[in-house]
């Protein structure tokens, strides 16, 4: 079940594109946008991550940090981040433990029996790790409502 507004975000430790462990707790003290995506190199995921990349100046002015999370390997995430010049961490949840706690899972994703991917979701956390905004899509083809994300960040 996905997290809701007011929930304390569970801590996690995942690896980034350099296979370095990164924990939610390291981002404490900043507003955080956790962007869960179904898969690197897919059309909607690429557009979403590039939209967050292009909003870096605005996000910085709001004291906010973006972190992308997918079930892809750190190697695929590195290639994806490099190809799209992403300037924020991309974390790998290949075990799918964290996506189950946060966003939920698409089973048999893209018609691939036995393959699961994260639902597309965005959570805005305050400096204390409390969820201030939550959006989870049942359709992997839907982009997040970026204006709502910005408004949520600006509201606290």
Image (cartoon, rainbow, N blue to C red):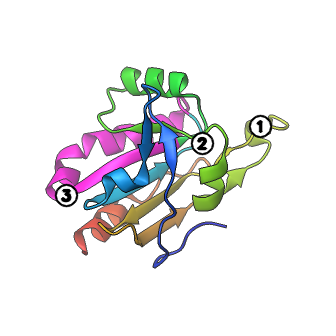
Mark-to-mark CA distance, 1 and 3: 36 Å
Mark-to-mark CA distance, 3 and 2: 26 Å
Q: For residue 139, say whether it is visible.
A: no
Q: Nearer the viewer, residue 96 or 59?
A: 96
Residue drawn at x 34%, y 57% as measured from the top left: 32
Residue drawn at x 37%, y 22% as measured from the top left: 82
Q: Position of residue 8 (x, y in %)?
A: 47, 72
Q: Which residues are magenta?
A: 40-69
Residue that lies at the very extreme toward the left in this rendered image: 61
Question: Where is mark 2, residue-wise?
Answer: 38
Taking 60 as reference, is 148 left or right?
Answer: right
Q: Secondary structure at mark 1?
A: loop
Find residue 28 and report its image quarter.
bottom left
Find residue 88 and report its image quarter.
top left
* Neighbour tally class for label 3: few under 14, some 14-19, many 20 plus, Cα within 10 Å: some
Q: Quadrant of the N terminus?
A: bottom right
């Amino acid at each position: 079940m996905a997290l809701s507004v007011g929930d304390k975000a569970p801590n996690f430790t995942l690896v980034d594109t350099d296979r370095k462990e990164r924990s939610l707790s390291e981002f404490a003290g900043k507003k955080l946008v956790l962007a869960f995506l179904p898969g690197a190199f897919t059309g909607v995921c690429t557009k979403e991550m590039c939209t967050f990349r292009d909003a870096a100046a605005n996000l910085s002015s709001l004291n906010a940090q973006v972190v992308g999370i997918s079930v892809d390997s750190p190697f695929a995430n590195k290639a994806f981040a490099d190809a799209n010049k992403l300037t924020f961490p991309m974390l790998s949840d290949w075990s799918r433990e964290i996506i189950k706690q946060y966003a939920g899972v698409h089973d048999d994703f893209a018609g691939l029996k036995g393959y699961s991917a994260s639902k597309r979701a965005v959570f805005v956390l305050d400096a204390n790790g409390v969820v201030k905004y939550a959006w989870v899509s049942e359709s992997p083809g839907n982009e997040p409502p970026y204006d709502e994300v910005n408004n949520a960040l600006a509201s606290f």
